[in-house]
Image: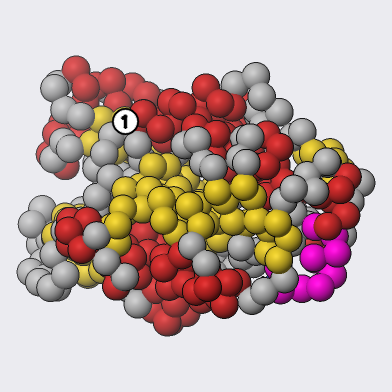
Amino acid sequence: MVVEGAVTLNVDGAFYNPRMRLNRDVGVAMARALEVTDYLDALAASGARGLRVAKEAGVSSVALNDVSPRAVALIKENARLNGREGCEILSSNANVLLHQRHFEAVDLDPFGSPAPFIAAAARSAQSYLFITATDTAPLCGAHLKSGIRKYMAVPVKAEHHREMGARILLGAVARELARVDKGMRPLLTHASDHYVRTYLGVERGAKSADRTLESMGYIEQCRSCGLWRTVLGMGCRSSGECSFCGGRADMAGPLWLGPIQDRGVIEKALAAMEGSAAQSDRGIKILQLCKDEIDLPMYYDQHRLCRKFKATPGTAEDLVQGLQSLGWRASRTHFSGVGIKTDAPIEVLRGLLSTL
Ligand SMILES: C[S@@+](CC[C@H](N)C(=O)[O-])C[C@H]1O[C@@H](n2cnc3c(N)ncnc32)[C@H](O)[C@@H]1O
Ligand SMILES: [Zn+2]
């Protein structure tokens, strides 16, 4: 028996991962912030996530589904244990269920890659799609071929590989939504531990789909100095050369280049989390960092910059403040403790690092 948030659960090792608690805490806060009323935990295992959403986020209509009979027995027991007999408990293959029924919010939290479920979830989700991906090695380029098979995108190895992985996932979801004439608006995206988690608003209509695809593109990344530029559009045009050092440049993508956080929604999630059973220091910290991230793809690794420009590393905060005082946009990023997001050109960073 474990207690997590406001629920008590009878657990079975295979179906409950205590290390995903943070992921569920944030999920509960987001469901509350978005005032979700109809929610499907498509891969529910012990029911921890869906039951918490029912109890803590006050979502009135919650369905929990799992293909495993053992998991379904566990979910039924846990629903009873928490007075949530009103939840609907289903034992379908998630892909069949998602093709049969629409849900306002669909949550995909699989073992490993969500790729096999994205198409069906894109069809089912009417307003929200929440996705966890624990296959960070394929997403970030460590398992290149697997990533290409799952997401039909090519990552490049770089310091900002965590964000690249998140954007490759978002790009794959954007394309699946577009196929069924839907668009998306990312509300919160975080990479924590060994997973990426994203909360997407889903918008119906071909126009939304077209607008969504306008945020697709590529990252051209220099092999030698690491400088990158974004190339918007679905056609892949590479100069092959870095504009800063002349080194060879690789293309990564297609991937999502649009915003990945929604400050207003994240503020509501913070308010929902504070003082609630889902509160944790880490949860609050991640939400705060995500809220304050500037809306630009990718980030510099402060240590790599310092090595490259032979500067002594100060704090990331000093560098952010230095950039801001020069009039540039700059922020830390939750993706890395030494990551700096900024619209300042690399020359500005070089100049600043030599004075800090
Ligand atoms: C990582 S667990 C889910 C954890 C849960 N969401 C949580 O937060 O506690 C993934 C679950 O997906 C189930 N599953 C795998 N393939 C499935 C499918 N095609 N349809 C429905 N459930 C499936 C497994 O039985 C397993 O219980
Ligand atoms: Zn270069």
Residue in the foreground of this view, choosing between 341 and 109: 109
Q: Is residue 342 left or right of residue 173?
A: left
Look at the numbered disc 1 and say if its residue's Cβ is closer than 8 Å to ligand 2. Answer: no
Image x and y of residue 275, in percent:
65, 19
How many other residues sit within 10 Å of disc 1, few (<14), some (14-19) or many (≥20)?
many
Q: Is residue 220 above or below residue 27?
A: below
Residue at 72% across / 71% down in the picture? Answer: 91
The structure residue drawn at horizontal position 85% and vertical position 64%, both measured from the top left corner, is 73
Indicate whether 261 appears above or below 202: above
Quadrant (top left, top right, bottom left, bottom right) of the C terminus:
top left
| Residue 158 lies in quadrant | bottom left
Task: Examine the structure image and report whether residue 72 is included in the region drawn in magenta.
Answer: yes
Q: What stretch is highlighted in magenta?
A: 66-75
Image quadrant of residue 262? Answer: top left
User: Where in the figure is residue 289, as x and y percent of width and height?
Assistant: 44, 31
> Would you say 149 lies left or right of 154 here?
right
Which residue is label 1 attached to? 331
Secondary structure under tag 1 reads strand
Q: Is the magenta stretch mostly helix, strand or loop?
A: helix
Q: Which is nearer the eye, 112 or 74?
A: 74
Counting from the top left corner in percent of width and height, residue 54 is at 67, 42
Figure label count? 1
Residue at 37% across / 24% down in the picture? 317
- Does residue 85 show up magenta in the picture? no
Does residue 93 show up?
A: yes
Q: In this view, does 141 lie above or below 76?
A: below
Where in the figure is residue 147, as x and y percent of width and height?
43, 75
Residue 168 in view of the camera: no
Is 4 drawn above or below residue 102 in the view shown? above
- Horizontal side of 39 relative to 311 (left or right) equals right
Residue at position x 21%, y 26% in the image: 323
What amino acid is labelled 1 in the image?
Answer: Ser
